[in-house]
């Protein structure tokens, strides 16, 4: 009499590993890295100097008219939109491809920023937004004479 024993994987192990993989791969990117990041968001450097804050957006391929900056309720919003259209014509057919790209980032402005003195320059694929600090918050340095 032959007895064959069928070996099955532990149900808990199978459920755990499949469940873990399903949970990981069926998530949105924002679940893994946070809501502030999206695939088409440009990298941003934020630099503080004695007189300013500077935001540097890496956004190659845009034109300066593609950008809009808005301050409202102590928030700075930087937005860019562009449209590209490629058309290939052949004797038999025409192929058109449309591409739309955009991003929008908002930042809460610190009370130390003079909202009337915000400037922006777009050059070589980098958008630089300069936020001037208010005069009363800039550090004051005085030389004191010894008597």
Image (tube, helix red, strand yellow):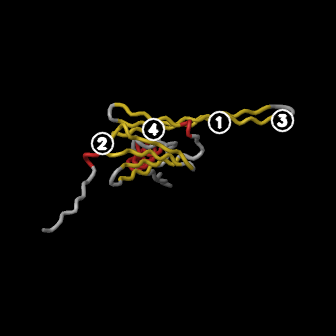
User: Residue 56's mark?
Assistant: none
Q: Residue at x 45, y 38 (%)?
A: 78
Looking at marks 4 and 2 on the same chain, the residue that comes earlier in the sequence is marked by 4
- Identify the residue at the far bottom of this view: 147
Q: Position of residue 60 (x, y in %)?
A: 57, 47
Which residue is denoted by mark 2 in the rendering?
A: 110
Above or below, 94 against 109 in this view is above
Query: Residues under labels 4 and 2: Cα distance?
Result: 16 Å
Which residue is denoted by mark 3 in the rendering?
A: 90
Looking at marks 4 and 1 on the same chain, the residue that comes earlier in the sequence is marked by 4
* In this rendering, position of residue 62 left or right of residue 50: right
Q: Secondary structure at mark 1?
A: strand
Q: Secondary structure at mark 3?
A: loop
Q: Disc 3 vs disc 4: which is toward the camera? A: 4
Which residue is denoted by mark 1 in the rendering?
A: 84
User: Residue 78's mark?
Assistant: 4
* In this rendering, position of residue 123 left or right of residue 19: right
Above or below, 48 against 61 in this view is below
Q: Residue at x 36, y 45 (%)?
A: 132
């Amino acid at each position: 009499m032959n007895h064959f024993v069928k070996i099955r994987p532990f149900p808990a192990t199978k459920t755990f590993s499949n469940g873990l993989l399903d949970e990981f791969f069926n998530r949105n990117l924002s679940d893994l890295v946070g809501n502030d990041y999206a695939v088409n968001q440009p990298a941003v450097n934020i630099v503080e100097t004695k007189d300013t804050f500077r935001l540097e957006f890496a956004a190659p391929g845009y034109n300066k008219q593609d950008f809009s900056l808005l301050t409202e309720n102590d928030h700075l919003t930087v937005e860019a939109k562009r449209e590209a259209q490629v058309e290939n014509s052949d004797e038999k057919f025409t192929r058109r491809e449309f591409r739309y790209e955009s991003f929008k980032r908002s930042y809460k402005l610190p009370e130390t920023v003079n909202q009337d003195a915000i400037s922006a320059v777009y050059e070589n694929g980098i958008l630089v937004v300069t936020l001037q600090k208010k005069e009363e918050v800039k550090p004051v340095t005085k030389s004191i004479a010894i008597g």
